[in-house]
Image (tube, grey):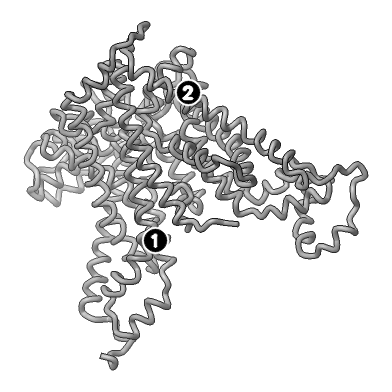
Amino acid sequence: MTTSRASAELFRVRHIPDSVESRPVPLAIKEPASINPKASKAYYFWLMTPAIAVLAFISIYPFFWMIYMSLHEVDIGKVEWNNFANFTRLANDTRFIQGWWLLIQYSAMCLFLQIVIGVFIAVALNGSRYEKVLVTTLLMPMMMAPLVAGMVWYFLYNGTFGWYHWILQSVGILGPRSILASSSTAMIGIVLVDVWQWTPLITLITLAGLKRVPQDQLEANMVDGASPIRNFVSVTLPNLYPVLLIAIMLRFMDNFRFIDSVLVLTGGGPGNSTKILPVYLFEVSFKFFKLGRGAAIALTLLVVTIILGLILVKVFDRQQPKKG
Amino acid sequence: MASRGVISYETPLSKAFRWFSAVFIGFYVIWTVLPIFVMFVSSFKDLLEAFKLPAVGDWAGITVFFEFSPTFKHYYELFANLGFSTYLFNSLVAAGGSAVISVVLGSMAAYSLSRIDFRGKNDLFFWIISTRMAPVVAVMVPLYWIFRELGLVGTLPGLILAYTTFNLPFAIWILKGFFDNVPYAIEEAQMVDGATRLQAFRAILPLVAPGIGAFVVLCILFAWNDYLFAAIIGSGGAKTLPAATRELVQPQNIQWGQIMAAGVVTTLPMMFLGLVIRKYLVTGLTMGAVKE
């Protein structure tokens, strides 16, 4: 029997089980596979093998290579054991430690601004007449390649012909130097780009969460004389908490993952004021081609990501009640 | 305070909040759209026109921004002389290839994972999602070494494989959620009718097809927008649009018009695709944790 006909008749079978008997049954029917659990298990394992094999080749195999490389001096055409020198060097590497510190600062600033602005916009937009149009507009930055976003902002920040620089200068916040040119403000410059691009994601997530807030509870509270602020704090926020937690985790990991815009905007400078760890790692590995040292740094980054991932999976599990 | 009417929510405070939020949203929309708008307009400006700025504090001078005669020469230059048609092709092949591979292999694996239980399944899942979350720069260090040994650096297959490192785990993870929502009873009914397991699998595919389509698009988007892999793994023979755009920045004589035009070429298709899969966007971008 053809599959399309089968799927068309699916629902009839489900609702009126009797009709199964009245249907033509192929003569050479084997026993239904589902009654042979051992055979079916093998089948499912074979079905997932290609994906698992590919994934192993591009994740587990490189992972062991990474460990191997981190223990060696790796250069073009030469791999030499160097007695953990890559790791002992990290302990005294101020730029490595500073890189971690800057990464934490950068992520914290991005997250704080994104959550505050994103949640506010979502609460203000929720249920408004323009919600749909505005949300669609807000989506646009997220679709942009981070590199292109970095380029456009680099243009806007430019000290001689950038429009944002002109605005900041006209308002009197900045002098003639561009925001990216001095080490005290460059970090704010790169944070703003991330905030511009990814606050809409927080808004979208919050809007999805707001739809789940029990309206009757809000109304009941209002009848009892609770102020809107009280209502927001004691009903809406607790309901938003789980989705916000997911949003925070995801953004945190993305700040570790994406450095495209930072590479374009400052490349880590001026001085080392924006050399967050992934940028430093990129520089060590692919500018100076110290792949052994790079692997050691990458390993620390990976370990932290895995720990964050463990927390994330816990949060995910709590979000989705187990299905039977 | 029981006598306080339920309908009287228009207190001065709430009115102020409403006004404040309207103004804030207004500013926020401008701040969101402005960079994109500037990119579009600047891509049609001649070099000197793009550099025009009013004097500091001269707010009336903003009109300078619109004083230009539109030109298509940057777009022409990109495709006629700078080889952007090749880069566009590379982007299409690399993003499309990895998306198709990821979703085909991913849906098979996701389907199996959603149908059986075994020991260590949770560990397997954790491995899958941590592969997806791993920082690209960190992954690239060993991957670059391996790919160089295999001669994959600078080739499109290499780039496709590199993109699969984040697209395949994404596809498995998110499609599993989709298959979980298809009741097993449907396949069971099929098999009772004599369908083989593979036929039963094919029969439920139409039910998940919209989701699968949307996640193909999302995989394309992730790969298309990547710069780091393209810059290192793809350097040389497999330059994609973002990598090529980056190379337009020369130490001297930055061609802003061309850069903005390249930005438009890179961004426009993805914005369009984003609108097409709008319904699945939040689910996709939050790894399935949040549904609209």
Crowding at mark 2 (Cα within 10 Å: few <14, some 14-19, many 20+): some
- Quick check: can you spot residue B253? yes
Question: Type of residue at label 1?
Answer: Leu
Residue at the spot of label 1: A207
Give the left or right position of residue B129, taking residue A19 as reference. Answer: left
Q: Residue under mark 2: which chain is it in?
A: A
Quarter-of-image position of residue A78: top left
Quarter-of-image position of residue B100: top right
Give the left or right position of residue A281, taking residue A2 as reference. Answer: left
Provide residue B162's location: percent of width, then percent of height: 46, 26
Give the left or right position of residue A125, taking residue B155 as reference. Answer: left
Question: Type of residue at label 2?
Answer: Tyr
Q: Residue under mark 1: which chain is it in?
A: A
Residue A61's disc number: 2
Say what secondary structure mark 1 lies in.
helix
Give the left or right position of residue B109, taking residue A12 as reference. Answer: left
Crowding at mark 1 (Cα within 10 Å: few <14, some 14-19, many 20+): many
- Quick check: can you spot residue A264? no
Residue at the image point whose x is 48% and y is 50% from the top: B288
- Asked if both marks, 2 and 1, belong to the same chain, the answer given is yes
Front position in the image: B36 or B171: B171
In this picture, is A260 found above or below A32?
A: above
Residue at the image point whose x is 60% and y is 38% from the top: B109
In this picture, is A269 found above or below A123?
A: above
Residue at the image point whose x is 33% and y is 8% from the top: A80
Front position in the image: A58 or B88: A58
Q: Quadrant of the C terminus of chain A?
A: bottom right
Residue B46's disc number: none
Provide residue B46's location: percent of width, then percent of height: 27, 32
Return the disc, 2 or 1, that comes first in the chain's sequence: 2
Please, which residue is most extreme toward the bottom here? B3
